[in-house]
Image (cartoon, helix red, strand yellow):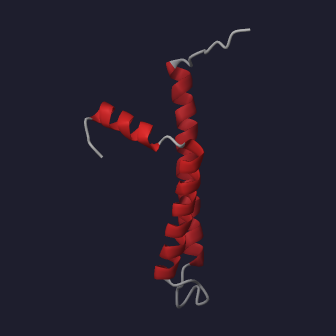
Amino acid sequence: MTDQHVNLTQDEIFAELVKLFTTQLSTADAIKALKNKNKFNKKTNPTGIDSHELGLIVAAAKLEANEAYEEFTGRNAEIKAKFEELTGYNL
């Protein structure tokens, strides 16, 4: 039994990327809505969280998600090298 790899067509890659980018945009909207819903506003949300504190919570959550992802992939050095190779930019 051989492990044969089948490449996607350009149209299939495009369709998959559209799905992923749509999900990414939807997620960004959901994050923005969550922050706005919980942010302090004297008139509309007097029990909300102070903007600075909310920013710290967001940063901490992003850091945790990034660390978990980095641990999962373990590919940061490879990704950086490929980025530099393809773009000519040094990170």
Q: Residue at x 32, y 31 (%)?
A: 86
Judge whether 72 appears above or below 4 on screen.
below
Residue 78 horizontal/vertical position (percent) = 43, 36
Splitting the image into 4 quarters, where does residue 89 fall? top left
The answer to whether 1 is drawn above or below residue 70 in the figure is: above
Direction from residue 52 to residue 3 in the image, left or right: right
Q: Residue at x 45, y 44 (%)?
A: 76
Residue 18 placement (x, y as % from top left): 53, 36
Where residue 53 appears, as percent x and y from the top left, is 51, 81
Please, which residue is most extreme toward the top here?
1
Residue at (54%, 90%) from the top-left corner?
43
Front position in the image: 65 or 10:
65
Count every numbered label the image shows and give the total.
0
User: Residue 65, located in which quarter of the rendered image?
Assistant: bottom right
The location of residue 71, given as percent across then percent down, is: 57, 49
Can you say whether 83 is above or below 55 in the image? above
Q: Which of 34 and 85 is in front in this view?
A: 85
Quadrant in the picture for the N terminus: top right
Residue at the image point whose x is 53% and y is 26% from the top: 13
